[in-house]
Amino acid sequence: MSAQDWVRPEIAALSAYHVADAAGLIKLDAMENPFPLPEPLQAELGQRLAKAALNRYPDPHGAGLQSKLKTAFAMPAEARVILGNGSDELITLICQALAKPGAKLLAAEPSFVMYKMNAVFSRLEYIGVPLKADFTLDLPAMLAAIGAHQPAVIFLAYPNNPTGPRYGRAEVEAILDAAPGMVVVDEAYSAFASDSFMDLAGRHPNLVVMRTLSKLGLAGIRLGYAAGPADWIAELEKVRPPYNINVLSQTAALFALDHLDVFKEQAALLCTERTRLAMGLKALPGMTVFASEANFITARVPDALRTFAAMKAAGILIKCLHGSHPLLEHCLRFTVGTPAENDSVLAALPNCL
Ligand SMILES: *Cc1c(COP(=O)(O)O)cnc(C)c1O
């Protein structure tokens, strides 16, 4: 028997998460913050990391880090927090904890691919409810699916990736009221968005607000966090690997939270650039540009494969969404970069359409 014969068929049928090679290209495919840490801070961080206790296992709960996150991001006192090796890991832990036989995971789609992937990994039945063509939520369809399927967990990205818009707050509240199980409001893009559910974390019995430091400018350290009611978080803690946040990441995160103003300034600049990039894209013929409250802009072009390839040949790596979901036909996703990188996009694109 070969390896494939031993592996669960639904796993054997998958292909591993593909990360495009960006060598030599302007990298605008993965919603990274394009700005490096300012040099004086690099030096200070270096000193802190040099002193980190690498011989010891990390603080198992990242308790110092948790309380700092609670203060920095204004979490309600009632909220309990769990840390993940990226919010990717939190999605995995939630699915592991809730995967009773027959349990279901419901998500609007298209959305973050790891929701569906983790449903497969954990043997949750996946229920996808299509968004409307303009990527707004189809609330009646969501409520009908919730009623029919009684999902153990619902994932809502707020704002949504890979589309850009943020759903209406009242719509998400209606889903919170209707949901029998956990509702995860995934706020990976909170640094760029005009609304958040963090004010309800720990106060609404079914709500877990999940976030990450990745899009803010720390994708490399892999730190996600989720805030919610004590009873839900206590169950998730049972499946969390004891030392999932390594010493270097904890040290770097504590340092970064002392300098949050730097990251907030960068995020504000990226929001200004988002507006400028959107205006430039809208001015081009044949483009449909979708609203975005994240650090990327999704747009439909006449021929996505052609434009993607031509942009790459021009030295710019974006994300081609065409083929990943019927609603994303001929869509491309542009991460907002530095002003110079965005200039390059706007200069190259007219020749790539
Ligand atoms: C990027 C992203 C994540 C994952 O973030 P990590 O913390 O880097 O794992 C989660 N949810 C959404 C919607 C994202 O776009």
Image (spheres, helix red, strand yellow):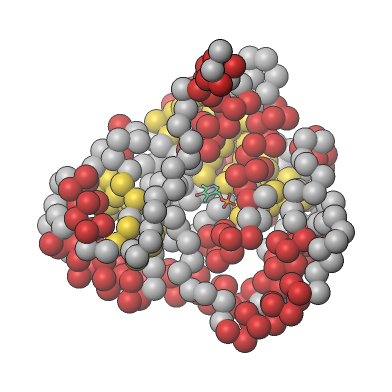
Q: Is residue 189 visible?
A: yes
Give x and y (percent) for residue 160: 46, 47
Could you tell me which quadrant the N terminus lies in? top right
Between 304 and 248, the one nearer to me in the picture? 248
The residue lying furthest to the bottom in this view is 40
Between 45 and 148, the one nearer to me in the picture? 45
Quadrant of the image occupied by residue 125: top right
Please tell me whether residue 289 is drawn above or below residue 257 in the rendered image.
above
Indicate left or right for 330 with 31 as reference: left
> At x 38% / y 58%, what residue is drawn?
22
The residue lying furthest to the front in this view is 1
> At x 48% / y 61%, what residue is drawn?
32
> At x 54% / y 35%, what residue is drawn?
115
Give x and y (percent) for residue 92: 64, 36
> At x 65% / y 43%, what residue is drawn?
89
Quadrant of the image occupied by residue 97: top right
Give x and y (percent) for residue 272: 39, 72
Could you tell me which quadrant the C terminus lies in? bottom left
Indicate left or right for 1 with 329 as reference: right
Please tell me whether residue 256 is drawn above or below residue 215 in the rendered image.
below
Indicate left or right for 136 with 313 as reference: right
Indicate left or right for 5 with 353 as reference: right
Marks counted in the figure total 0
Give x and y (percent) for residue 238: 82, 36
Between 226 and 198, the one nearer to me in the picture? 226
